[in-house]
Image (cartoon, grey):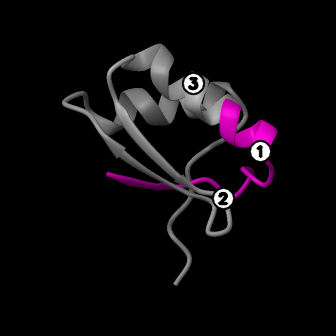
Amino acid sequence: MRLHLPNMNCGGCARSVTRAIQSVDANASIVIDQNRREVELTSDLPRDRFASALAAAGFPEAPAAD
């Protein structure tokens, strides 16, 4: 799944996003594109669990920019 996180704008943010995702699924595959402010995430868990954890960490998901 691809998540657009407009508040992720630096390396510290990317680390916080990674920690939030790993708090839900420590085995998730995570690829961060900081320039596009996107995360490509592979996990068997539902999207809403990650969205909740990311929002709590200050990185709410937004629709992808076209």
Q: Nearer the viewer, residue 4 or 43?
A: 43
Mark 3 vs 2, N-terminal side:
3
Badge number at residue 20: 3
Q: CA distance from mark 1 to mark 3?
A: 14 Å
Q: Are marks 1 and 2 in contact (CB under 8 Å)?
A: yes
The residue tagged 1 is 11
- Neighbourhood count class around disc 1 (C-alpha, 10 Å): few under 14, some 14–19, many 20 upward: few
Give the mark nearer the N terminus: 1 vs 3. 1
At 57% across and 31% down in the image, what residue appears?
A: 18
Left or right side of 10 for 31: left
The numbered disc on residue 34 is 2
Left or right of 3 in this view: 56: right
Q: CA distance from mark 1 to mark 2?
A: 8 Å
- Which numbered disc, 1 or 2, marks the residue that appears first in the sequence? 1
Crowd tier of the residue under label 3, counting other residues whose Cα lies within 10 Å: few below 14, some 14–19, many 20 or above: many
In the image, which residues are magenta? 1-15
Q: CA distance from mark 3 to mark 2?
A: 16 Å
